[in-house]
Image (cartoon, rainbow, N blue to C red):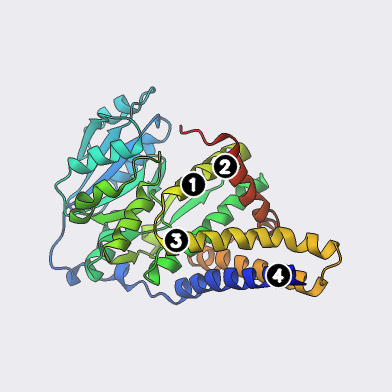
Amino acid sequence: MVLTVILSAIMAVYVFLVAKCCVAFYKYDDHTATAAPAAQKTVPSVSVIVSAKNEEANLPQFLDDMKAQTMPGCSLILVDDNSTDDTYSIAAGRGDLDMTLLKNTGHGKKSALNYGISQSDSLYILSTDADCFPRPRWAQTLVNAAQIVDADMIMAPVIIEAPDKSKMFQRLWQAESFALITITAGTCIDGKPVMCNGGNIGYRASFIKQSIGDINGKYASGDDMFMMESAGRQRKRFVYAKNPDAVIRTAGVETLGQLLNQRARWVSKTGGYTDYYILFFAFAILLGNLAAIVAPILWACGGAWWMALTVLLSKFAVDFASVRVSSEYYNEHQRFIDVIALGIVYPYYVVAAIFTFWGRGFKWK
């Protein structure tokens, strides 16, 4: 009985946190990203910093998307991170772009981004990846959002595309991406962001340049999260660009092994977090998923069936809402059966990602 009560308490916290994000996302009126340019005092200069490693397959499309940007004064700083393919030569051949092409003087994404940031003299710095594809008004939308509320850090959505929609697991992770969008947006809107996505993020240049030392060099990834922590410590202003023009799309991984490797990389960063609310939120989400695994076992062992069923149904309901609220807003309707399947397998997948990291770590591309 005691264990059942504990599971119920854990799930109550989980449901409260996720439901709070859903409500914040649903109610948020994104006037910041849709305001008329006339409301701005100046048209700021913007640098898009991208670290690219072995991206010859994605780079032509990405560069075309950057050329299509409508933001005046938007330039690209592309840092080749020791590629072994034709990434550098493809970029070098694009003389039609306002682009500064650099070679990383160190190793790794953080080093490449730091180098690119040091070469920018713009008022705003946006960052994405070479396998991400923005809409034409992407840069303008993010900067509009930052200017109108005078924000130092801008967050925006990354939608995962399923490479093969005939494969259920790929559809499941696309659905998961909407749950992550809801949590990212909801906590950012509430002023206490707990996660962000380096594939679609922006900063006031003065903030990131003075805080660049807060990017924890001990960890291979996590530049976005560590900068978010730094902004929180300095009481900087955050804004979420909810507008559809702020969307960036990227292809999802093709195999379960690749997915677990990616999530293991995410898990690896948690040891570097120092913000207590971020750690609390992450721990509550982990415990909520563990509770969903333990509840049916407890039921099978003679525990109160109604309590176990309540735990499972409440988790499914709030998880469904987290997928639905953002996917419907971005007109990306998810199959009901996929969301059900995600709710069933997700707790086990979370645990699998943790054990993947503990067992063998992760491989950076």
Residue 362 pos. (x, y %): 52, 36
> What's the amino acid at mark 1?
Trp
Residue 29 occupies quadrant: bottom left
Is 351 above or below relative to 53?
below
Query: 326 or 356, which lies in front?
Result: 356
**Callout 2 secondary element:** helix
Residue named by callout 2: 259
Residue 244 pos. (x, y %): 40, 62
Estimate how packed mark 4 is, as few (under 14), some (14 to 19) or many (20 or more) residues with alpha carbons within 10 Å. many
Mark pair 1, 2: CA separation? 11 Å
Residue 133 pos. (x, y %): 39, 46
Residue named by callout 3: 278
- Please identify, in this view, whether the residue under mark 1 or under mark 2 is nearer the observer: 1
**Callout 4 secondary element:** helix
Query: 54 or 17, which lies in front?
Result: 17
Considering the image in quadrants, where does the N terminus appear?
bottom right
Query: 318 or 74, which lies in front?
Result: 318
Residue named by callout 1: 266
User: Of callouts 3 and 1, which one flags the residue occurring earlier in the amino acid sequence?
Assistant: 1
- Please identify, in this view, whether the residue under mark 2 or under mark 3 is nearer the observer: 3
> What's the amino acid at mark 3?
Ile
> What's the amino acid at mark 2?
Leu
Is 283 above or below relative to 310?
above
Mark pair 2, 4: CA separation? 27 Å
Answer left or right for 181 relative to 104.
Answer: right
Q: Are marks 1 and 4 in contact (CB under 8 Å)?
A: no
User: Of callouts 2 and 3, which one flags the residue occurring earlier in the amino acid sequence?
Assistant: 2
Mark pair 3, 1: CA separation? 14 Å
Residue at the (49%, 46%) spot, across then down: 266
Mark pair 2, 3: CA separation? 23 Å
